[in-house]
Amino acid sequence: MTLGPVMLDVTGLRVTPEEKEILRHPSVGGVILFARNFESPRQLLALTAEIHALRRPEPLIAVDHEGGRVQRFLEGFTRIPAMRSLGERWEIDAAEARALAEATGYVIAVSSRWSCARTESISASRRCSTWTSARAA
């Protein structure tokens, strides 16, 4: 069996019997988790193990955990800065911004198989011109 193109969510802290049946469907390739799926690091490990045990290859597990205001899992997790703040820091000190971006990328990479963090955003703010400057170069 291969992973399908569909990514779904689950309703709570555990996978319901109905959700298990749906997640076994060949069209399903992954599950995206949100704050409603998180109670503690231990519970999250149990939930992801439960999802992975449903089939082979294991479904991808993603989290909409972008940083800044979008922090789905709090207790036991490193807070990730808003990606905009990295661009704003670049305007002040490019070397520091690069170091912060690398550290943030490392935290994201080791904590999930797939993150929904933005890698590029267009800012309407005049305070941060990094995106337009980088594109113009």
Image: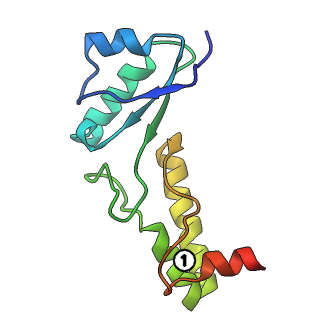
Please tell me whether residue 110 is drawn above or below residue 69 in the rendered image.
Answer: above
Which residue lies most toward the right here? 137
Which residue lies most toward the bottom here? 92
Residue ID for mark 1? 87
* Position of residue 21 in the picture relative to residue 123 (left or right): left
Please tell me whether residue 122 is drawn above or below residue 48 in the rendered image.
Answer: below
> Can you tell which quarter of the image residue 92 is in?
bottom right
Please tell me whether residue 51 is drawn above or below residue 98 in the rendered image.
Answer: above
* Position of residue 102 in the picture relative to residue 107 (left or right): right
At x 42% / y 16%, what residue is drawn? Answer: 23
What x and y, as percent, mark residue 67? 40, 61
Which residue lies most toward the front here? 124
What x and y, as percent, mark residue 110? 52, 48
- Local packing at callout 1 (Cα closer than 10 Å; few below 14, some 14-19, many 20+) is many
Query: Which quarter of the rendered picture does the C terminus lie within?
Result: bottom right
> Can you tell which quarter of the image residue 16 is in?
top left
Query: Which quarter of the rendered picture does the N terminus lie within?
Result: top right
Q: Secondary structure at mark 1?
A: helix
Please tell me whether residue 61 is drawn above or below residue 50 in the rendered image.
Answer: below
Between 104 and 129, the residue placed more toward the observer is 129
* Position of residue 128 in the picture relative to residue 14 (left or right): right
